[in-house]
Amino acid sequence: MVCVQSFGAGAVVGVLYAALRVRSPAPPLIGLIGLAGMLIGYGLSDCLT
């Protein structure tokens, strides 16, 4: 359920960024690497607890 909420929040923020024509603070590749790191960290924290 938390993953669905996180995805929903990210989608809302993405739509707001697009509507307001705000440039992303990070280049797409760096942003994707950061997201991948967060997902890996989230998965590891579930395994460790």
Image (cartoon, grey):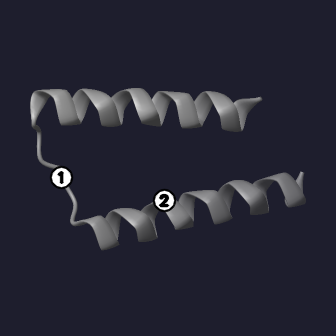
Q: Position of residue 3 (x, y in %)?
A: 69, 38
The amino acid type found where label 1 is placed reads Pro
Establish if 26 lies above or below 24: below
Q: Amino acid at mark 2?
A: Leu
- Mark 1 or mark 2, which has the lower sequence index? 1
Based on the displayed image, in which of its 4 quarters is residue 36 positioned?
bottom right
Disc 1: CA contacts within 10 A as few (<14), some (14-19) or many (>=20): few
Write the residue at 32% across / 70% down: 30
- Number of marks: 2
Q: Residue at x 34, y 31 (%)?
A: 13
Residue in the foreground of this view, choosing between 34 and 19: 19
Q: Secondary structure at mark 1?
A: loop
Q: Quadrant of residue 12?
A: top left
In the picture, the disc for residue 25 is 1
Residue 5 located left or right of residue 10: right
Where in the figure is residue 20, as x and y percent of width and height?
12, 28
Proximity of marks 1 and 2: CB atoms separated by less than 8 Å: no
Q: Residue at x 69, y 54 (%)?
A: 42
Q: Quadrant of the N terminus?
A: top right
Nearer-the-camera pick, 25 or 4 = 4
**What mark, if any, has residue 40 been given in the picture?**
none
Q: Which residue is mark 2?
A: 35
In the image, is 31 to the left or to the right of 44? left
Relative side of 4 to 31, left or right: right
Which one is nearer the viewer's eye here, 31 or 20? Answer: 20
Position of residue 3 in the picture relative to residue 44 (left or right): left
Q: Kindly state the secondary structure of the residue where label 2 is placed.
A: helix
Identify whether 5 is placed above or below 21.
above
The residue that appears at 71% across and 32% down in the rendered structure is 2
